[in-house]
Amino acid sequence: MMNGKLKVGVFKLASCSGCQMVLVHLEESLLEVLKYVELKYFRMVSDDDLPNEPLDVAIVEGAVTNEEEGIMIKKIRKMSRFLIAAGACAATGGLNAIKNTTPEGEVESTVYSSPEYIRSGKAFGLNEYVNVDAYLYGCPIDGRELINTLMSLAIRVPPYIPGITVCMECKMNGNECIFLTRGEPCLGPVTVGGCNALCPSNGVTCEGCRGVLKGTNPKGLELAWTNAGVSPDLIRLKLRKYSDVYKLLTR
Amino acid sequence: MAFVLKKEELPHFSKHIISKEYGLFAPVRKEARSIFKRIDENQVGEVSLDYIRTIMPPLKSLLIPPKETLLKIKDGKIEEMLPGPENKTAILGVHPCDVNAMNLLERVYMDRPKDPYFEARRKNLIIIALNCSSADEKCFCTSFGTGPSLEEGFDLILTDLGDRFLVEVGSRKGSELIGDFYMPKASSTDLMEKDETIRRVKGMIRRHVNTAGLQRIMTGALYNPIWNELADRCTGCGACNMVCPTCFCFNVIDEPELDSGSVLRSRTWDGCLLWEYAEVALGGNFRKDLSARIRQFVNHKMNYWLNQYGALGCVGCGRCIEQCPAKIDITSIVARLRGELL
Ligand code: SF4
Ligand code: SF4
Ligand code: SF4
Ligand code: SF4
Ligand code: SF4
Ligand code: SF4
C-alpha cells in the first residue's frame, strides 16, 4: 500500500449511515485527504458492487445483525489489509445491541410500524466475526479522528487512538462533575475519550457512545451510582443504551 | 518589602500587570466555582480571589499544558516548538499548596534532565500567590507544610485582610512588576493581621496525614488486601491523575497535520490509573490489575517520591478526594494503613 495513494473502501452494515455522513461532511478537508487516498468503494455515493481488487483500508460502518452481513464482513476482511471499525455500531454493536438485552419484538415494535419485515438477530460489533485493526469510536465518529487515522496510514505511522477516558478530558476542560454535583449517572469514567468530553462539557451526562475503555471498572461505577442513590431502573437503562457496558457487567 | 492594596484597587493592579505585556491568568467565577482564565483589560473586574479550590491545578495546566506540541517534522527537518520569551505570563491568586506543587514539578522537570519546554514556560512566568483566608474539610496542606501560607516560589504574595490585601515581595521580578504602581507601605498592624489570618485558617484544617515513618509503613503495606478492596470501588477513570497538581506523567503522540504535510509530535497528560499506562510492546502490561494501578497512585505520592525527588509528592490540596466519583480518599487510605482508622 506504500506506493501511490491509499486504496480505501467504505462499507455499511446495519447502521444509520451517520458515520458515513461524517465522512461526506468533511468537505474541504476531504478534498485534502483525497490527495493521499483513493476512494475505491463508497456505497453511499455510488451503486457499484463490492470492489474486486484488494484494498489497503476498509472503513466499515454498522453492526452485524444477520447471516448476510456476517458473510459480507468476512469478504471485506479478506480483501483488505487494514480494517477499521468505524462508529459505535461497528465497534460494539452500538444502539442496535439494545435488542440483545431487551425482548426483540418489544424493541422492533417501538421503532417500526410493521416489524414482521425485519430480518435480523442479535447485533454484534465486527470483532465478533473478524479481526479489527483499529477502532474509531463514537456515535457518530469524530471527523478529525477519521482524518488522522487515514493520514497516519497514508504516511505510514501508526494511527493514534486515545486510550484515555471521557472523565480525563472532562477534567482537562475544567468542568464541574455532573455526577458529583447533580447526582446524574454519567458514563464518563469508563468511556473511551477522544470526543473531548463533548456531552459533559455541554452540561449533559456521557451516554457512553464511544464504548468501554479497557481496564476501567464499570462495576465500580455501578456501585458509585447506587451509593449516590441513582435508582436501579435508571442504572439499567443507562448501562444498556450502548450495550457493551451491560455485557461486561453480566459476564 | 510589604505594601497594602485596597480591594477596590485590584482591577487597576490587574490592568497594570497587563500593561507590562503579561498575559494575565486569574480566577473568575463560573457557576458555583472559580476557574483560572486568561483575562484581558476589559475583564479585570471579573477577577475574584475569594475561592478555596479550583477543579484543575492552575500552574500545572500552564507549565505542562494538557496537550503541547513539541516538534514539527517536515521533509526530514525537525523544528522545536519552544515558547519564545515574548509569551510572558502572569498568574494571579494561586494558593500556597498549588505553588508548592509547582516547586515539586520543578524538581521533576528542571533537573535530570532539564525539560526545555517546561523551562521556557517557567522562565516566562511570574507568580502572584495568595495566602489562604479560608479552608474547607478537604484541605490538608498543614500535614506537609505546603500551606496555608507560603515561604518560597512566588514573586509577589497577597493576603486578604478584609478590606485590603497585604502585598509582599518575594523576588526582584516581583518588585519590578510593581514598578511605578503606587501602594502605601504596610504597617506592623497589617503584618500582625496576616499572621492572625493564617493562624485562623490553620485552625480550620481538620484533615491530616500523619507523615511520621510513612515511607516504611507504605512499603510494608504493598501487599495489603486494601488495594484489592479499593479496586472494587475505583472506576479507573483517571480523574485523580488529571486534577492532581503534582501528577506529571505524559504520553507522546504523532499526528499528521493535514494542510501543511507535516507531522506534529505532542505530549498529552497521561495517568497511571489507565490500563495503557503500563502497557509495553507486544501487549505486555506491568499493572494489569486496577489494584496495582491505584496502589501506584497512592504510593507514588506517599512513598516513592521521597527517594525519587527528596519530598513526598502530595501537597494536600484535596482535589483527588473532591473529584473522585467513587469517593476514594487518599487520607483515609493512609490512616487505615497506619491503623489509625478502621
Ligand atoms: S461529568 Fe461525567 S465525564 Fe465529567 S467528570 Fe463527571 S463523571 Fe466524569
Ligand atoms: S461524551 Fe460520551 S456520549 Fe458524548 S460523545 Fe463523548 S463518548 Fe459519546
Ligand atoms: S490546602 Fe491549604 S493551601 Fe491549599 S487551598 Fe486549602 S488551605 Fe489553602
Ligand atoms: S494526591 Fe490528591 S491531595 Fe495530594 S496533591 Fe494530589 S490531588 Fe492533591
Ligand atoms: S501518580 Fe501516577 S500519573 Fe501521577 S505522577 Fe505518579 S505515576 Fe505519574
Ligand atoms: S478518581 Fe477515583 S475512581 Fe477515578 S481512578 Fe481515581 S481513585 Fe479511581
Image (tube, helix red, strand yellow):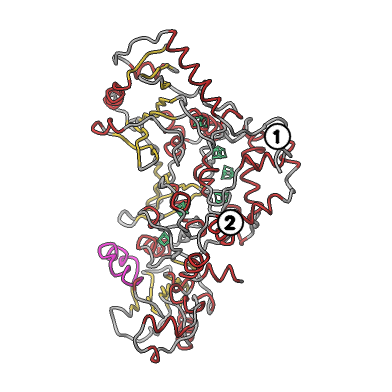
A22 falls in the magenta region: yes
- Residue that extends furthest to the left in the rendered view of this protein: B42
Q: Position of residue B14 (x, y in %)?
A: 30, 26
Q: Is residue B69 visible?
A: no
Residues packed near mark 1 inside 10 Å, few (<14), some (14 to 19) or many (20 plus): some
Secondary structure mostly seen in the magenta stretch: helix
Kindly state the secondary structure of the residue where label 2 is placed. Answer: loop
Read off the chain for label 1. Answer: B
- Which residue has dot 2 on it? B275
> Is A2 drawn above or below residue B266 in the view shown?
below
> Is A248 drawn above or below residue B112 in the view shown?
below
Q: Residue at x 35, y 43 (%)?
A: B31
Q: Amino acid at mark 2?
A: Trp
Q: Position of residue B116 (x, y in %)?
A: 46, 35
Q: Mark on residue B214?
A: 1
Read off the chain for label 2. Answer: B
Q: Nearer the viewer, mark 1 or mark 2?
A: 1
Q: Earlier in the sequence, mark 1 or mark 2?
A: 1
Q: Which residues are magenta?
A: A19-38
Q: Residue at x 47, y 57 (%)?
A: A188
Residues packed near mark 2 inside 10 Å, few (<14), some (14 to 19) or many (20 plus): many
Distance (Cα) linking label 1 and label 2: 28 Å
- Mark 1 vs ligand 4: CB below 8 Å: no
